[in-house]
Image (cartoon, grey):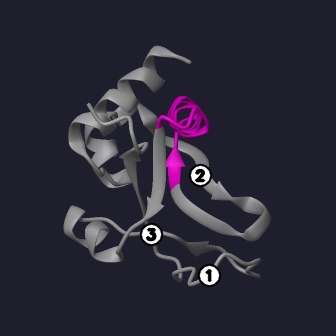
Amino acid sequence: MTDKSKDFIAFVKLNGCPTFREIEDEFPDFFGGDCSFGMPEKNILYWVGLSETGGDSIEAAVRSKVVEMRPTHIMNYVADGRILNLPLAKTLRVYKKPHWIPVAFYPAKGLVD
């Protein structure tokens, strides 16, 4: 796991449930690229515009099961000042066109210090 992934994990532990928009403020180098984060096989996106470093760091943290990604209410993103201009995915299924699931990140259960 990279230092960036470890920094991301520490940020999530400290800040509870940050959204991608809040992560963008803390880790600007995670963004500004053309990578997306989601389930491409289902045409579901969690966020777009990530750098390769950002996508890899967040994916490593989630795959390590130290950080959990959970759906959150769209109003959390509205309050943060940015939403994706995509229809909301209501269920986990294959969509013909891209859909968005707003998510937040949490420390994995049992790992909160």
| Residue position marked by numbered label 3 in the rendering | 84
- Tag in front: 1 or 2: 1
- Inter-mark Cα distance, 1 to 3: 17 Å
The residue lying at 26 percent from left, 46 percent from top is 16
**Badge 1 density bin: few <14, some 14–19, many ≥20, Cα 10 Å:** few
Q: From the image, which quarter does the C terminus lie in?
A: top left
**Badge 2 density bin: few <14, some 14–19, many ≥20, Cα 10 Å:** some
> What secondary structure is marked by label 2?
strand
| Residue position marked by numbered label 2 in the rendering | 37
Q: Tell me the magenta residue range.
A: 48-66
The residue lying at 37 percent from left, 48 percent from top is 106
The amino acid marked with disc number 3 is Leu
Say above or below: 70 vs 68. below
> What secondary structure is marked by label 3?
loop
Residue 76 lies left or right of residue 61; in this view the side is: left
Q: Residue furthest front?
A: 110
In primary-sequence order, the first of circles 1 and 2 is: 2
Residue situated in front as seen by the camera: 15 or 81: 15
- Tag in front: 1 or 3: 1
| Residue position marked by numbered label 1 in the rendering | 91
- Tag in front: 2 or 3: 2
